[in-house]
Structures are given as C-alpha cells and as structure tokens.
C-alpha cells in the first residue's frame, strides 16, 4: 500500500513539473522556472503585462524585446503558453517571422 501511495505522489510531482506556464498569469518565479527564461526576460514580460495581457504569441513577440520566432518556439517547447496556446509555425508565418528550425511538440 505504501509503495502505491509513493508512486501516486511521485506521478503527481512529475506531472506538475511539466505543467504549462501562461505568460499572462505566471508569477516571476513561474516564468523563471521555464528553461531559457532568466530574470531579465521575466522582468520584461512582467513589465509589458502591465500594459495589458498578451493577445497571442505575435503580441508577446512584438512587445517583449529579445523574443523572436525561433526563441518563442524554444520557450513554448519548454512549457510557456500565451492564453493557453503553444507557439506554432503557423503563428510565425502570420506574423511574417522566420520559421522555427523544428516544430514544437504539443
């Protein structure tokens, strides 16, 4: 019985470690937990969010310096979301951004 409880607890921990972080709702610590986002980028996202929530990935890319199509694809692959949506190649095509080097798994 103890082993089953331990396995269940570990499963929940692993699932929460891979949980998506939404740029519109995340705390500074949540943003910093995304691989590829450091304190500088977190601060930029938080500052731009004061002007209003990000409508979509294109809006985030336009408003946050240092994030382009390639970096957006990488951050999305690490769990960053905008309004619950991952970055996709079609998003960058609509914005006239260069295509990401590899597709993002959803």
Image (cartoon, helix red, strand yellow):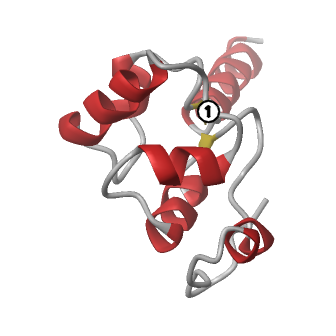
Q: Is residue 52 left or right of residue 41?
A: right
Q: Nearer the viewer, residue 9 or 81?
A: 81
**Residue 49 on image: x %, y %:** 47, 22
Q: Nearer the viewer, residue 28 or 69?
A: 69
Tally the numbered discs: 1
**Residue 93 on image: x %, y %:** 73, 77
**Above or below, comparing residue 15 to residue 2 in the picture:** below
**Residue 98 on image: x %, y %:** 56, 83
Residue located 70% across and 43% down the image: 56
**Above or below, comparing residue 8 to residue 76 in the picture:** above
Quarter assignment of residue 10? top right
**Residue 52 on image: x %, y %:** 56, 19
Q: Secondary structure at mark 1?
A: loop
Residue located 64% across and 50% down the image: 57
**Above or below, comparing residue 85 to residue 39 in the picture:** below
Q: Quadrant of the C terminus?
A: bottom right
Quarter assignment of residue 7? top right
Q: Mark 1 Cα within 10 Å, few/some/many (few <14, many 20+)?
A: many
Q: Quadrant of the N terminus?
A: top right
Residue located 65% across and 18% down the image: 9
Q: Nearer the viewer, residue 62 or 39?
A: 62
Residue located 74% across and 32% down the image: 83
Q: Is residue 9 left or right of residue 75?
A: right
Residue linked to disc 1: 54
Q: Is residue 13 left or right of residue 12?
A: left
Quarter assignment of residue 4? top right
């Amino acid at each position: 019985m103890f082993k089953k409880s331990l396995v269940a607890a570990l499963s929940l921990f692993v699932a929460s470690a891979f949980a998506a972080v939404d740029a519109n709702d995340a705390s500074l610590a949540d943003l910093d937990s995304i691989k590829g986002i450091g304190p500088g980028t977190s601060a930029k996202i938080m500052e731009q969010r004061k002007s209003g929530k990000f409508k979509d990935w294109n809006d985030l890319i336009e408003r946050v310096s240092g994030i382009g199509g390639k970096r957006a694809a990488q951050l999305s692959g690490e769990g960053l979301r905008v309004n619950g949506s991952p970055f996709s190649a079609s998003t960058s095509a609509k914005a006239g951004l260069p295509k990401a080097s590899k597709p993002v798994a959803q």
